[in-house]
Image (cartoon, rainbow, N blue to C red):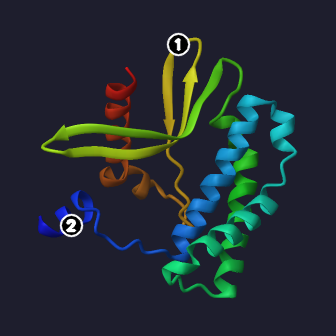
Amino acid sequence: PFRWKLNYIDKNRAKVETISTLFGRSMHEVLQEYLTVMYTETIPVADSLDLPKMLFERMSENFKRSHGSDISVTKEEMVEFFEDGCTIIEWFRKNKNDYFAKRGFELVGVEVPIEWPIQNGVKMYGFLDVVIRDTVLNRIKIYDFKTSRQGWNKYQKADKKKLTHLVLYKAFYAKQYG
């Protein structure tokens, strides 16, 4: 409990940057940019984006920004993660229509903040990766990107610990935004 207080109430925690967090942030930024362009402009404009180049640039920028946090990343790791990212991007392009439709949907936002008081100064605090509204049924869809390089098998998809945060996001989004 004391460690939790130091970390989350007193905000006295060291932010540890790894190649995985750098990669995850970069992938999120690229996919979120694609969806922002898709929903605010057109699908052909979004499809014309050079996502691998964007990923390379975002990984480079995020590495430079985090370099002060003593991140230890080799050139080989950056190349390996970039190549894995290109594979993810290829999968995303082929399968995006199974998850994201434009007709009847609108982008509410990316990195949508949630901050809701729970009790005694403790708050639910987080950011939703992508929020989309079904304009026909007036329903909200919340997407949380997972950029695991090992993939997501049926056991990981069924893991209640991995799914619980989505239920919390849903509950607190509903409270905060009605």
Quadrant assignment for the C terminus = top left
Find residue 6 and name its label: 2
Inspect the image, locate mark 1, and give the three-letter code of the amino acid beneath it. Answer: Leu
Q: Mark 1 and 2 residues: CB-CB less than 8 Å, in contact?
A: no
Residue 98 in picture, x, y percent from top left: 66, 36
Given the current orientation, which residue lies at the most extreme top position?
A: 136
Amino acid type at mark 2 = Leu
Q: Nearer the viewer, residue 119 or 46?
A: 119
Q: Compared with residue 82, is residue 137 higher up or lower down, i.e. above or below?
A: above
Is the residue 176 above or below the residue 11 in the image?
Answer: above
Relative to 156, 57 lies left or right = right
Sequence-wise, which precedes: disc 1 or disc 2? 2
Q: In which quadrant will I find the N terminus?
A: bottom left
Instruction: Tell me where residue 121 appears, x and y as whole percent.
Output: 18, 45
Where does label 1 land, which residue?
Answer: 137
Q: Crowdedness of circle 2 by 10 Å Cα count: few (<14), some, many (20+)? A: few
Give residue 9's quadrant in the image.
Answer: bottom left
Is residue 48 left or right of 54 when viewed as pictured? right
Say whether residue 68 is left or right of residue 124. Answer: right
Q: Nearer the viewer, mark 1 or mark 2?
A: 2
Q: Residue at x 56, y 60 (%)?
A: 147
Horizontal and vertical percent position of residue 139: 49, 19
Where is residue 20? Give x, y as percent.
53, 71
| Secondary structure category for the residue under label 2 | helix
Side of 64 where 142 appears, left or right: left
36 is higher (above) or lower (below) than 13: above
